[in-house]
């Protein structure tokens, strides 16, 4: 939450000529509700179910089309049961944008549409619970800088060194939390 997944994902996808999708946007489009409204009206379990369904739909579409996909996951997606295994089974590469906690707090405190952000202690507790999952990502990239610098770090990873000059029709979906 607050790491800049969407901002970095859009820039990265543009640079690679890949399709970009934001999982939260898919969820909002599917339900016709904002993320905070889903949490408030339907609860987190319903949100997580829709999240799982929309992730599956995005992975299936990417696999069937052979289209390269940059998918920004929600901050809690990767920490849900079975998600690490599902993304690995899909052949997705997961990148964790690791930002300093103080910066995450500052970003989240100024945005009203984060239903799981209540206060600093609960945020730190939530982050601590998610860290063991984030640490299972294929790559950890320091965040907290200008988005273009984060993109440059990602592009310097060996998988992207091979892909950045490849045709955008690369068959594997690539996902980042």
Image (tube, rainbow, N blue to C red):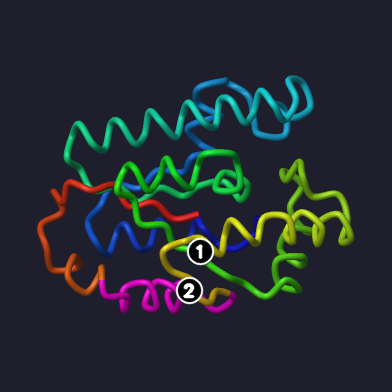
Asked if labels 2 and 1 touch by Cβ distance under 8 angstroms, the answer is: yes
Where residue 171 sits: x, y (%)?
17, 46
Q: 37 or 65: nearer the eye?
A: 65
Q: Does residue 136 appear to the left or right of 33 in the view shown?
A: left
Q: Position of residue 165 (x, y in %)?
A: 13, 68
Q: Main secondary structure of the magenta part?
A: helix
Magenta residues, start to end? 144-158
Q: Which element is circle 1 on?
A: strand
Q: Position of residue 141 (x, y in %)?
A: 48, 73
Q: Secondary structure at mark 2?
A: strand
**Residue in view at x 86 percent, y 54 percent:** 122
Asked whether, in this view, residue 50 is left or right of residue 35, the answer is left
Query: Compared with residue 142, is residue 168 higher up or lower down, i.e. above or below?
Result: above
- The quarter of the picture where the N terminus appears is bottom right
On screen, residue 68 versus residue 93, left or right, reads left
Residue identified by numbered label 2: 141
6 is within the stretch colored magenta: no
Picture residue at 32% right of the left edge, 75% below the top: 157
Q: Which residue is mark 1?
A: 96
The residue under the point 44% across, 35% down is 55
As displayed, is residue 144 above or below residue 43?
A: below
Measured in 3D between alpha carbons, the distance from the residue under mark 1 to the one under mark 2, in whole angstroms, is 6 Å
């Amino acid at each position: 939450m607050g790491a800049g997944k969407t901002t970095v994902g859009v820039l990265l996808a543009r640079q690679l000529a890949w399709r970009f999708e934001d999982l939260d946007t898919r969820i909002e489009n599917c339900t016709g509700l904002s993320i905070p409204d889903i949490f408030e009206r339907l609860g987190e379990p319903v949100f997580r179910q829709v999240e799982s369904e929309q992730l599956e739909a995005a992975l299936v579409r990417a696999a069937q089309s052979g289209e390269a996909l940059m998918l920004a996951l929600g901050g809690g997606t990767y920490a849900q049961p079975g998600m690490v295994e599902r993304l690995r089974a899909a052949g997705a590469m997961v990148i964790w944008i690791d930002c300093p906690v103080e910066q995450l707090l500052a970003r989240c405190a100024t945005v009203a549409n984060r239903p799981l952000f209540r206060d600093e202690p609960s945020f730190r507790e939530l982050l601590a619970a998610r860290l063991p999952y984030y640490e299972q990502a294929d790559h950890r990239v320091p965040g907290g800088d200008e988005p273009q610098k984060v993109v440059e770090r990602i592009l310097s990873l060996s998988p992207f060194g091979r892909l950045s000059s490849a045709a955008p029709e690369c068959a594997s979906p690539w996902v980042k939390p």
